[in-house]
Image (cartoon, rainbow, N blue to C red):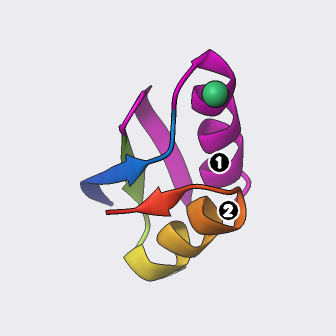
Amino acid sequence: MTEIIIKIEGMSCMHCVGRVRGAVEALTGVQALDVQIGQVKVTFDESKLKKGDIEKAITAAGYKVM
Ligand SMILES: [Cu+2]
């Protein structure tokens, strides 16, 4: 498992925190360790997906990856 922090632009409230958590945890092999306004810390299985896939899910949820 690989642990990374992804910086995110456009999050402003607890609703955003919930949306980002839901978006990343919907992916197989990803677990959100900590979600705050402006960033998410995740652990993921590199045999299942790449960092770019997680970033895409965040973008699809309406936020911008820094
Ligand atoms: Cu919000």
Q: Which residue does the image show at 60% across and 53% down from the upper left? A: 24
Q: Which residues are magenta?
A: 12-38
**Is residue 4 rendered to the left or right of residue 14?**
left
**Hey, what amino acid is under mark 2?**
Leu
Identify whether 51 is placed above or below 31: below
Does 2 appear in magenta? Answer: no
In which quadrant is the N terminus drawn?
Answer: bottom left
Identify whether 10 is placed above or below 49: above
Q: Which residue is labeled 1 in the image?
A: 25
Q: Position of residue 25 (x, y in %)?
A: 65, 48
* Real-space CA distance between mark 2 and mark 1, rounded to the nearest whole angstrom: 5 Å
Whether residue 17 appears in this view of the structure is yes
**Hey, what amino acid is under mark 1?**
Glu
- Which disc, if any, is residue 27? 2
> Where in the image, quadrant-wise, is ligand 1 located?
top right
Cβ of mark 1 under 8 A from ligand 1 = no
The kind of secondary structure element at disc 2 is loop
In which quadrant is the C terminus drawn?
Answer: bottom left
Q: Position of residue 59 (x, y in %)?
A: 60, 66
Whether residue 50 appears in this view of the structure is no
Q: Which residue does the image show at 67% across and 62% down from the upper left? A: 27
The kind of secondary structure element at disc 1 is helix
Q: Which residue does the image show at 69% across and 23% down from the upper left? A: 15
Does 32 appear in magenta? Answer: yes
- Which disc, if any, is residue 60? none
